[in-house]
Amino acid sequence: MALSNSERQERYRRSSRLGIGGEYERISCIVAISTKRSVERLAAHFGCSITEMIERLITEKTKSVLTQLDDDGQQRFYAEATRGNK
């Protein structure tokens, strides 16, 4: 018996470690063409995927911001994510 679409999606999410309890979550956004090209060029320059490049950029910027904050500022920074920002 063939799997339904929802069953296939659930199987894919489990195997790709997506969603709650997984290691990854999907981000979907639209950016300017020039921004996309810049990320592509950076990824090619550093020999990594676009996903890896975006992760690297976010990690580096997060570290930079955190070094400028005191303990209270860091707590507020981490609390921002729990407010449901879009």
Image: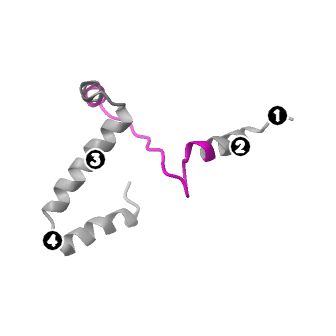
Q: Quadrant of residue 79?
A: bottom left
Identify the disc placed on residue 6: 2
* C-alpha separation, residue under disc 1 versus residue under disc 2: 12 Å
User: In the rendered structure, which disc, 3 or 4, sits on the residue that comes first in sequence?
Assistant: 3
What amino acid type is highlighted by mark number 1?
Ala
Mark 3 = which residue?
A: 58
User: In the rendered structure, which disc, 4 or 2, sits on the residue that comes first in sequence?
Assistant: 2
Q: Is residue 37 in the magenta section? A: yes
* C-alpha separation, residue under disc 3 versus residue under disc 4: 20 Å
Q: Quadrant of residue 42?
A: top left
What amino acid type is highlighted by mark number 4?
Asp
Mark 1 = which residue?
A: 2
* C-alpha separation, residue under disc 1 versus residue under disc 3: 41 Å
User: In the rendered structure, which disc, 2 or 3, sits on the residue that comes first in sequence?
Assistant: 2
Q: Which residues are magenta?
A: 14-40
Residue 30 horizontal/vertical position (percent): 38, 36
Residue 14 horizontal/vertical position (percent): 62, 47
Tell me if residue 62 comes above or below residue 41 in the rendering: below
Q: The C terminus appears in which quarter of the rendering?
A: bottom left
Tag 2 and tag 3, C-beta contact below 8 Å: no
Tag 4 and tag 2, C-beta contact below 8 Å: no
Query: In what element is the residue under mark 4?
Result: loop
Mark 4 = which residue?
A: 70
Tell me if residue 62 comes above or below residue 81 in the rendering: above
Residue 34 horizontal/vertical position (percent): 25, 26
User: In the rendered structure, which disc, 1 or 3, sits on the residue that comes first in sequence?
Assistant: 1
* C-alpha separation, residue under disc 4 versus residue under disc 2: 46 Å
Query: In what element is the residue under mark 3?
Result: helix
User: In the rendered structure, which disc, 1 or 4, sits on the residue that comes first in sequence?
Assistant: 1
